[in-house]
Image (tube, rainbow, N blue to C red):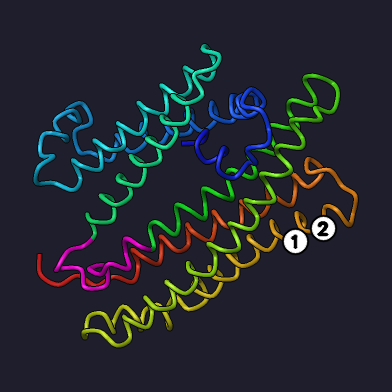
């Protein structure tokens, strides 16, 4: 996943060995985060010690499918991490594993969204739910990737007590592309959310009730959520765009980039809260 995306956002003009060096530590962070996330999700089940049975209904259950694809995502990512740390070369295999992890990750998100498409939950039972999930994943992924790259560059400078020129150039080029991607993703994310709110207003009685909750009881949180997304992406785009004019190196903007990522994370947490708080269930 990370290797494939870095090869996409990073320029191919840099050597494969240099790309491998940049990926290594950052991929370790991503895999560690995935492990903790899976452990936390594991205890959502009423009987965690029987969690292995949750995959037995793959043919009929979207929850089982989500678990299977999440496990596949983790296993492929772990294989990629192994090759990054212990096997030189194999760049074609590494790239294939990276894109395969992306595929499994997107399938897991799709299954996750399908879980919420229930006739008893009118506010959720719309394709916009799945689309918004993908928007969240892409936006958070781009923001986190930029932060991890710069953080890793700073740590490497401290450990090696000097500026790693080739490394810094790769990160600089990649972060610029990520900033553009963040701005491009933000636009449809905002539009999708606005269209979702409009669909609630023009939908069934229960959907209109959800709309009333959003624009009345939760209106301050809704506004704050949009402001956090705009401010977060802006806090990434502006410092990156000003790099050449200010003469700063990419590692010197770590603080605003980190803050930008934090703002977007808080904004998406608010969005998830609103997603659950505004729904009205009908029947069982």
Instruction: Report the magenta residues as a range.
Output: 117-131
Residue count near mark 1 (Cα–Cα under 10 Å), binned few <14, some 14–19, many ≥20: few
Q: Is residue 230 left or right of residue 150?
A: left
In the picture as drawn, the residue positioned furthest to the front comes out as: 13
Residue 122 in the magenta stretch? The answer is yes
> Number of labelled discs?
2
Secondary structure at numbered mark 1: helix
x and y percentages locating residue 45 in the rendered image: 23, 38
Q: Residue at x 40, y 40 (%)?
A: 102
Residue 147 in the magenta stretch? The answer is no
Which residue is labeled 1 in the image? 238
Image quarter hosting the C terminus:
bottom left
x and y percentages locating residue 60 in the rendered image: 9, 46
Q: Quadrant of residue 38?
A: top left
Q: Residue at x 10, y 39 (%)?
A: 57
Q: Residue at x 29, y 52 (%)?
A: 110
Q: Are marks 2 and 1 in contact (CB under 8 Å)?
A: yes
Q: Is residue 279 above or below residue 51?
A: below
Secondary structure at numbered mark 2: loop
x and y percentages locating residue 91 in the rendered image: 51, 24
Q: Is residue 82 above or below residue 216?
A: above
Real-space Cα distance between discs 2 and 1? 6 Å
């Amino acid at each position: 996943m990370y290797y494939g995306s870095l090869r996409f956002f990073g320029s191919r003009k840099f050597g494969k060995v240099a790309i491998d060096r940049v990926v290594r530590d950052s991929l370790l962070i991503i895999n560690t985060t995935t492990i903790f996330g899976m452990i936390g999700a594991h205890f959502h089940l009423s009987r965690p010690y029987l969690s292995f049975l949750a995959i037995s209904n793959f043919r009929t259950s979207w929850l089982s499918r989500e678990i299977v694809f999440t496990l596949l995502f983790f296993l492929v990512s772990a294989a990629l991490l192994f090759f990054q740390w212990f096997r030189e070369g194999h760049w074609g295999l590494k790239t294939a594993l990276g894109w395969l992890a992306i595929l499994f990750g997107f399938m897991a998100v799709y299954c996750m969204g399908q879980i919420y498409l229930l006739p008893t939950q009118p506010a959720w039972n719309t394709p916009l739910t799945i689309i918004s999930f993908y928007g969240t994943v892409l936006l958070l992924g781009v923001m986190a990737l930029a932060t991890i790259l710069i953080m890793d560059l700073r740590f490497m400078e401290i450990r090696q007590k000097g500026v790693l020129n080739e490394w810094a150039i790769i990160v600089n080029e990649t972060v610029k592309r990520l900033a553009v991607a963040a701005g491009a993703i933000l636009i449809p994310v905002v539009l999708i959310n606005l269209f979702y709110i409009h669909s609630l207003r023009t939908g069934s009685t229960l959907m209109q009730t959800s709309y009333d909750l959003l624009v009345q009881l939760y209106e301050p949180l809704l506004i704050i959520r949009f402001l956090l997304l705009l401010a977060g992406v802006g806090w990434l785009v502006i410092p990156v765009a000003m790099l050449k004019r200010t003469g700063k190196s990419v590692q010197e903007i770590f603080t605003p980039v980190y803050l930008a990522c934090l703002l977007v994370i808080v904004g998406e947490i608010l969005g998830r809260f609103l997603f659950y708080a505004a729904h009205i269930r009908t029947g069982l």
